[in-house]
Amino acid sequence: MRIWHVAAAWLRAVFLRGRREAELDEELGFHIDRETERLVAAGAAPAEARLQARRAFGGVEVVKEESRDARGTAFVDHLTRDTRHAARRLRRDWRFTLAAVVILGLGIGVNAAIFSVINAVLFRPQFVANPDALVDIYQNAPGGAPTGSSYAAYLDMAAYTDIFASSAVAFIPHPVTYSVGGPLRQAIAENTSASYLTVLGLRPALGRWFTEAEDTLKAPPVVVLGYRAWTTRFASDPAVVGRIIRIDGVPVTVVGVGPANHAASMNFGAHTDFWMPLRTLVALNGMPPGMFERGVSEPAFMVKARLQPGVTVAQAQAAMSTLGSRLAREFPKEDLKAGISVFAWRDVRIHPQLDVILAGFATALMAIVGLVLAIACSNLATLLLVRGAARVKEVSVRLAVGATRGQLVRHLLTESVLLALAGGAAGCVLAWWTMRWLSTLDLPVVVDFSLDFRVLGFALALSFVTGILFGLAPALHSTRVELWQTLRDDGEIRASGRRWFSLKNSLVVFQVAVSVFLLAGTGLALQMMAAGRAKQVGYAVDGVAMLQTDARYVVNTPADQPRLFEQLLTRVKAIPGVQAAVLTRDLPMNVAGLRIAIDGAADGAMQNAEAASIWAGPGFFETLQIPILYGRALDARDRQGAARAAVVNEGLARRYFGTANAVGRRFSLEPGDGQWMTIVGVARDTWTNDLGDIVDPVPYLFYRPIEQWNVMPTTVVARTTLGEAPLVRAMQVEMRRVNERLPVLTAKTMRQVLDDSLQAAQGLAAFFTALGVLGLTLAGIGLYAVIAFAVARRSREIGIRMALGAGSQQVVWSVARDVAALVGVGTAGGLALWIVAVLVMKVAPVQTSGVANIQFYQPDVDPLAMLTIAAFTAIVGIAASYIPARRAARLNPLIALRHD
Amino acid sequence: MSDQTDLLQGTLDLLIMRTIALEPLHGWAIAQRIQQVSDELLRVQQGSLYPALHRLEHQGWIAAEWGASDNNRRARFYSLTRAGRRQLATEVSKWERLSAGVNLVLHRT
């Protein structure tokens, strides 16, 4: 009631302002007229009576003001009036306004853009029916962190039908290639159980979901298109149902289109393009049929279940804990033995473990772009201070005629908030542009980057906070004036303006320092890249080229594939200059992390050791020139049927067998594989093909003969003496001669692969450079404003000096000294901050999140980078002070002394 | 503002509400009426009347309506609302307690 009353009064105040003012005038006018009448009736002369009535009444304007205030709508009144005034002032001062809007737009825009990426990845909700009854279930990894489940464990979970009304499982999303007749394209596929969509309570937009009968090893493969894939990649063609497309080379029938509001089983902004039955993984992706067994080394099935009515998450957790201990008892060898975790579906974004990492990453990212906003804010505060100092007389006059300091502060704050809102709008435009640009990039995954209310709300809130933040200090500062001083209009204020430790100076120093800090981030990223480049990879790079294809796009019977690759290998070997060539899978030196068990090891850690596998064929070590230290390389003897052989690198041998010469020792894939691989040779340590890797100094590698494991090759690698770039082309020519329909997945030199692996670091460097340069540009503008203002203020002093014989050099020097001090202190501060950050990174404890050997990149303090940055800021300082210094030097003493 | 004006303001509110409790009046008439009834003892500062009227209106104790005055001009007439009557009763009793107390202190010591 009361609130409604107030709100109505406020609305009236805003919209009926004119009418209310007129009424107030009329009411007071009536009073005075009536009083005049009374006095006339009592015998006074009309003119005299009116005067007397007015005198008795008091100041009409004061009464009006007090009456307005008494209504309690003064706040709204003042706000509308202040806003109107502020808008008028900003329009009049349009150059300043434009500069401010651009500065704020950049600051807020960068934040809004980064936030919308984070929003797309972390915050956009998925739609499911009745989300409260949905849970995510994970088997725990040794150590207790939730990981994936084995398929067998999923079946055990699903058997709890008194707890779960229905349950489904999805395999982690993975990249595939596909072709609709044209060239190969990349896409993301997910394999789920047939129950997936019903558990979520959704319906296909078109056609149907696949059935349980289609989720068998023998069934012809079918696919449900993701809704977004259907609209973007298949032009929303309703006739797509029933069509056959080739996915990973295999013909697959489209049976339906997924629901419009469901992107993927893991909610990280990417949209799944192809939904397929679980068993298709075997036919399409070459996964072993054993992947559905209990004892897989990396369980990667994610379980979702719908609770029975009335069952709580806690009850489900209790039931699953019971199951967890039962599994550990019944399957001591195969099971992970670490229990099962149940999460409410709402509490998981992507995966419990990933969520934590991503949240940390997002926080760090926002903190970094927040620094840019901090620069923009302090920059604007600097400009406002300078402007406020120039307006000190106006402020004094207004104070003198009775405005309170509070009113003035309110005016100035309204102005800065208005500016910030305009800047926020500009920032949204900038963010929108960025997002549109990101959407045009040919990313391998479809991510929805569109701006939504969250981003807009974020930008709005940010603008408000920003406006107050950069407006408050200058507003307080510039309204704190001594009337007698400023109105006397002489040199007094100049003395106060020359304090060294002034707010303006501190702000400029802050801007320089933060920009330097950001630029040092560039230095770090470049350092990471340089470290990557400098790595002794340990295998041949020069002269090495590769060609990756997918033979399934041209041959339908797997048995025909080896023949095709043999032909290709023979032809590549015959290319002039080629010294050696080999067939492998994926890109050479690509690794897959696996758990292995060491024969004869009693130690638990050795039964579950981390290592990385590389597929090799006969001639692999020769082609990549990796020396064999003990034993022999893999060769033609290691074929199907022969005893399983492997070559390990020195690091693995030392780590897990305690000796470099581990020839003759055995290990197996863990857990439960049981088939021993005998080490036939030990190779010298090498890097993988990922130089940007932050993983441990020496990877533990083992090489398996591709033929022995019945794994289809995809790639031919060759080394030439005649230059690798022509070899890449020559290999493609040879491949067309083998079969002209064979698609090219990758045609690169080894050097290119290594360079590509540094893209992340490169991106990081570009990101920091962009932010650092932006920050320093802003700092330069701030510096210019401060110096230009100082020169203008000191023009009389400078004039006197020049009149007394100071040369223009001395004058320039006095300006330069100020700039040098500001830039110097700022740069030193930023670099000091950076050194502290580097030292903290060095002593910070090494993270081992379940995976062994992870050691994050540890930067060094790089004096050369620091020197470069210092030089860079010095240039900005000189550029910012050039015009003011020149103006000071060319000052005509006569004019300057007449200045006021 | 000093405490003294606050006290006077409160008193003014009481006087205004008491005056218009009988019949709706416009601002000038309220001032006149207070002066007459108090035998010219109380003189309302005419300018300060209006902020008080607008505040009371905002608080919902009095309501305003445009009507014709005795000289046939449009004037703003104020009347007590139901909440205003309740408020007046409390204010009156409060005032009586206060003045009784003050009287006791003045005459017994």
Image (tube, coloured by chain):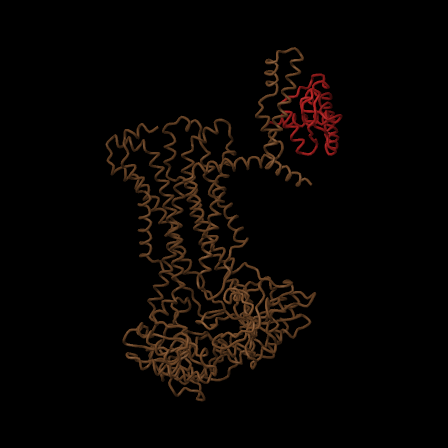
Chain colours: A brown, B red
Residue A652 against residue A784 in the figure, above or below = below
Q: Nearer the viewer, residue A854 or A245?
A: A245
Residue lying at 63% horizontally and 33% vertically, measured from the top left = A71
Where A590 sits versus B86, above or below? below
Give the farthest residue toward the front: A239
Is residue A178 visible to the viewer in this orientation of the structure? no
Q: Give me the residue at 33% from left, 47% from top.
A: A876
Residue A653: x %, y % from top left: 40, 78
B89 vs A766, nearest the viewer = A766
**Which quadrant: the C terminus of chain A?**
top left
Q: Nearer the viewer, residue A30 or A5?
A: A30
A143 relative position to B96: left or right: left
Residue A167 to residue A16: above or below: below
Give residue A175's position: percent from left, percent from top. 48, 71
Q: Position of residue B60 (x, y in %)?
A: 69, 34
Q: Residue at x 43, y 89 (%)?
A: A642
User: Does residue A233 appear in the picture of this structure?
Assistant: yes
In this rendering, the count of numbered labels is: 0
Task: Write down the quadrant of residue A434 in the picture.
Answer: bottom left
The x, y position of residue A486, in whole percent, is: 41, 29
Question: Which quarter of the rendered picture does the N terminus of chain A lie within?
Answer: top right
User: Closer to the camera, A8 or A837?
Assistant: A8
| Location of residue A262 (image quadrant) | bottom right
